[in-house]
Image (cartoon, coloured by chain):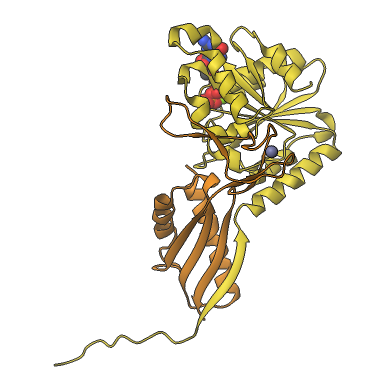
Chain colours: A yellow, B orange
Amino acid sequence: MKINDVVKAEEGEIFDIELDENILKANAELAQQNRELLRKQGVKAIDVMGSIGAGKTSLIEKMVQKLKTHYRIAVFKGDLTTTIDAEIIGKHGVNVVAINTGKECHLDANLVQKALRRLDLEATDLLFIENVGNLICPAEFPLGSEKRIVVISVTEGPYMVVKHPFIFMDADVAVINKIDLAEAMGVDIAKLQNDVKKINPKTKTVTTNCRTGKGVDQVIAALNL
Amino acid sequence: MHEGSITSQIVENVLREAEKRKAKRVLEVHLEIGKLMFLNPEQVHFWYQMLTKNTILEGSQLLIEEKPGTVKCPKCGYEGDFQYVDDPALHMPMPTLNCPKCDGTVKIVSGKDCFIKTVKMLI
Ligand SMILES: Nc1nc2c(ncn2[C@@H]2O[C@H](COP(=O)(O)OP(=O)(O)OP(=O)(O)O)[C@@H](O)[C@H]2O)c(=O)[nH]1
Ligand SMILES: [Mg+2]
Ligand SMILES: [Zn+2]
């Protein structure tokens, strides 16, 4: 028998190294930096999260229309690859920074920090940050904003809240949009509101039709704007 | 959902640590994942294999330990699992921020984190 190949143990010693390293710490620290920067510059930042197509952009448009005489507004728009939403909002004459997340399904504090560098914070009072449509991931990645809105719509069916409790736990305001379609969809709005209340009694719920603007004043009031 | 980005951060951090210590190979990585991270361990394993190709982590063992979430009530001091609502219309009980012991609102203490606990390296 001829031995062609001898498997040799690799030289060296094996060590067990205790790291105890928190993977989300980097994001949390950047979020804290963003929060401090925004506070120092007197900018009120509001996260707008929610499911795909729920009406996040429509809600921001309506709020911008109502608030732009009182506040100098800017909008960050997170999207996978397109700038469609950014262009829609830009028509209202406010500053818009499009943030393309590439393959990521959510914004993170680092991307927001880069976008903040492109904005004249001295000339900004109010900042809306539209996240990528997603009810799961943004809950894990704080951005440094002061308030968080979650938008869902009745067209997504009656279980949207109970299936994603964690995003509502962090929400200051839950917006239930497209109430004009509730009857057609056979969705009980009171039940959705009650689900939010069960998950987090402190979250305020508002029902809206962001096509007509119905309920948008209540969203603004719920944000203390 | 975000398994890809989380796993690439894990691989990056381990690589950085291994380079710092001039390790020849990484043999084992031990993770602790909080339940509230909603990471699917199977997908984390899949991404890990993909992302460690052609690095000194290639072929290493990834051990994942899932940790439950805990909450605490500032009003009565309760500490433990969430209160769940059972709705016959749901497939699963829904966690809530209501305190199971009083009418307070609880805060999440743990479960929303992901730790690299230990790494076994050949140095
Ligand atoms: N019927 C009805 N349609 C609405 C309402 N609000 C928004 N829409 C429509 O729903 C569609 C999606 O609205 P968007 O505001 O783009 O939703 P979005 O959440 O920003 O969507 P993504 O950013 O793509 O996830 C658009 O065609 C809107 O005109 C509403 O209250 N009622
Ligand atoms: Mg949009
Ligand atoms: Zn209690």
Residue at x 75%, y 43% (from the top left corner): A34
| As drawn, B18 above or below A134 | below
In-image side of B64 versus A98 (left or right):
left
Quadrant for residue A207, please give it. top right
Residue at x 59%, y 38% (from the top left corner): A139
Residue A25 position within the rendered picture, expressed as x and y whole percent measured from the top left: 66, 54
Quadrant for residue A115, please give it. top right
In-image side of B112 versus B28 (left or right):
right
In-image side of B116 versus A29 (left or right):
left
Residue A87 position within the rendered picture, expressed as x and y whole percent measured from the top left: 60, 23
Nearer to me, A129 or A145? A145
> Which quadrant of the figure shows ligand 1?
top right
Residue farthest front in this picture? B101
Indicate the quadrant containing the C terminus of chain A: top left, top right, bottom left or bottom right: top right
Residue A55 visible to the viewer: no
Residue at x 77%, y 41% (from the top left corner): A35
Residue at x 56%, y 65% (from the top left corner): B117
Residue A27 visible to the viewer: yes
Indicate the quadrant containing the N terminus of chain A: top left, top right, bottom left or bottom right: bottom left
Quadrant for residue A167, please give it. top right
| As drawn, B32 above or below A10 | above
Nearer to me, A215 or B23? A215
Residue B104 position within the rendered picture, expressed as x and y whole percent measured from the top left: 70, 34
